[in-house]
Structure formats: structure tokens, C-alpha cells
Amino acid sequence: MSLFENPNQYDGTDAQRIQQAVAAAAAGNGRVIIPRINESNHSHVWLLDEAIRLPSNITVELNGCHLKLSDRCRDNFFRSANCGIGIAPIEPLENIHLIGNNGAVLEGADHPRATGDAAKTLGERTYGTDAGVDGEAQNGDWRNIGILLASVSHFSIQNIHMIDSHCWAISVEYCNNGILRDLRFTSYGHKIIDGKKETILNQDGLDLRHGCHDILIENISGETGDDLIALTAIPNAERQAGNTSSTMISADHESTFPGIHNIIIRNVRGHCAGGHHIVRLLNTRGLPMDNIVIDGLIDTSYAPYQSRVALKIGDKFPQYGGINPLGTTRRIIANNIISRAKYAVLIGGSLCDSSISNVLQNGGDFDAVYFESGAENVRNVTLHNVQTVS
């Protein structure tokens, strides 16, 4: 028996060859290695027309390879095999690992068919060659996410460079006991396509959606068109699993862990080229977010790419349901933050039983820690060694 499966052993398109290797590994040793050289065309690029679907008990190693979405593709690079169009309910999977080495790269298409999230119309607010095409969805959706995992326990995504994502580069929802490590992102909120600067919205780096818990995020770097890291618990009672009208593939009722809990984020070095947030914590409509540690955030921005906020907690605006009730966002520890953003730490919603320390704001017109939502929405939050320098 081979120690691993190699897609060069199979026939078909690049996506079909990789999927066949995954299927063989799932029935055998559980390990696939995608090598640097694609022997079908003696190229170092593997061109994907569709998503690679990952079952339980699989490890896919990207060994110096360059995976790129084709102009035909309106799909993810990888997603857990339990989800897709019309798949409901989403059954739990476990032990899925996607590990890069030797400079593994995942790159968006030259001419993306669709970009942005479900609130964006193609051709009006964000680029997409499907704009105006009969029979094609005219808004973005979860297919624009680069790597998408849903209801997976004991997982990891490690050591990958993601370039020009079509929406969020990585999103995990209702997942637990995972590691997201050594990830680099390069996107700017726009791309030169056929000599023209085209807008590409919602290019977050890494998103945890509600239902996520017990996850380590570390060694994250680069620049993104939207938030570099976002933890968002935004419920929608009308969402059905596998519906392409949403940026989240799960239905809201598919977990007993509706909020976000027990997350460690450390060693973040990057910025938001689109002028948004480097790290954002956003829970809405009463969903809880607690036991979150952020330790080590360095804002690497340079002119003209200044982030608005290095760390934002909560939000007061109606589109997010207004300020969350006091007590739903709690036990947040934020430590060792160096910011060049307009705000180093912005408390936009409620916060209690938390600690913010060792914050250094380089310039700016606002306090290093700014309570936008007012004192009445804050309780038992301690500040230590918070300062602004010119």
C-alpha cells in the first residue's frame, strides 16, 4: 500500500484528479500529497474548476504546489464534504487537516465569476463575470469562500499563502477543537483585471462563525481587503443549509453551541488594506461570545493602507441588531497591541468582565482604547498600560 495518494496517478481535470486521490485516501491511509509539479501539463499550477470535498479522517498536504481557481470555477478551493448546494442537514465530520509546506499557494481566478458576500450584487458593488448572466445568481454566496469547513471537529489548516480571494479566504462554522496556524493573506479589496482596477469586496482573511469553540489561531500575517481576522456570531432564523442566498452554508439550528467560545488568537502581524479592522469580534442579537484571548497584535500598515481599527469589539449599528445586551460579550483578554490604525481598540458594543493591557497607539486623534458605545454598556473592564505616542 502506498504511504500516500498522489493526484498525478489519476486522469481527468485537475480537480477531478485531486478528488480521486482524496477518495482513495479516505478508503485507505487517509493521506494525500499534492506535489509541486502537475504532470498532466508539466506545470507548477493546479487549476481547479470545482471545489475539492474533504471527508472525515483525511490529511491533504500541499507540497509546494500552487492551486488556482479557473475562470470557469464558481466554487471553493476546499470544503468539508458534508455540505454543498441543497445538502441538509449538515452531518458532523471529524479529523480534517489541510497542511501546506514549501511555499504552498492558493490563488483566486484571473476573471472571477463572482466575488463578495451575499449582500453584494455582481457588477454593481463587486466584480463578477456572471453579472447579468441569465440563470446565474447575481449576488455573492458561500461558494466565494476559499476554504470552507462546516460542523467539523478536530481539524487544522496550516502554513498556506492565500492570494486574491473572492470573498473570505477561510471560513469555519459550527467547528470545534481546531488549529488555524501559519496563514498568510494577500489581497487589497481590488484587482487589476484586463488593465482595469476592479473592486472585490469582503476579502476577509480568516472568519470564525457562530457555533465555533475551542480553537487556536496563531501566526497570522499579511494584508486583506476586509477584516484580517473576524469572529462573527450573526444569526438568521430564515437561513437553510446549502442555500446559495447566504454567505453561511449552515442553518442556524444545527448546533447546541450558538455563540463563539474558548478562542485563542496570538501573534498577528498584518493590516486591512481596505481600511476596516485587523481583528473584529462581533456577536449580535443576543448570541454570546466569551473566553476569548488576543495576545500579540502588530499593525503592519503603511500609507495609504491604514486600518480603521486594530481590534474592534461589538457594534452599535442597527444592521447588526444594535448593541448586544450587557453580559453577552464577556471574559475577553486583549494584550500586547501595537497599532497604527485610527483606533487601537474600539469598543463598539457591550463588554464586561474583561481586561485590556499593553496597548500602544502610534498617533491618531482618539484614545488608544475608545468606548464608542458609552459607559452604560461597559462593566468591570480593566485597562493597564494603555498609551498613545506620536
Image: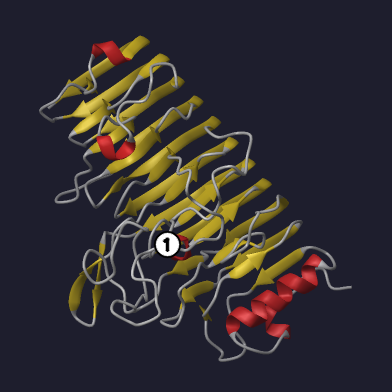
Residue 265 rendering spot, x and y as whole percentages: 48, 34
For this rendering, which residue is in front, 233 or 345?
Answer: 233
Q: Is residue 6 visible?
A: no
Residue at far right of view: 1
Question: In the picture, residue 55 is in which quadrant?
Answer: bottom right
Q: Is residue 73 visible?
A: yes
Judged left or right of residue 122, residue 304 is: left
Relative height, residue 317 to residue 65 (above, below)? above
Relative height, residue 17 to residue 262 (above, below)? below
Relative height, residue 39 to residue 390 (above, below)? below
Residue 387 rendering spot, x and y as whole percentages: 22, 18
Judged left or right of residue 121, residue 304 is: left
Q: Which residue is mark 1?
A: 141
Q: Residue at x 83, y 64 (%)?
A: 29
For this rendering, which residue is in front, 223 or 327?
Answer: 327
Total labels: the figure holds 1
Q: Residue at x 45, y 74 (%)?
A: 74
Kind of element beneath mark 1: loop
Q: Residue at x 26, y 35 (%)?
A: 318
Quarter containing the N terminus: bottom right
Residue at far front of view: 238
Residue 248 rendering spot, x and y as whole percentages: 48, 53
Question: In the picture, residue 102 is in which quadrant?
Answer: bottom right
Judged left or right of residue 280, residue 345 is: left
Question: In the picture, residue 343 is in which quadrant?
Answer: top left
Quarter containing the C terminus: top left
Please, what is the three-letter code of the amino acid marked with disc 1?
Asp
Residue 186 rendering spot, x and y as whole percentages: 35, 59
Residue at far top of view: 380
Dot 1: within a 10 Å radius of its alpha carbon, few (fewer than 14), some, or many (20 or more) residues?
many
Relative height, residue 233 to residue 49 (above, below)? above
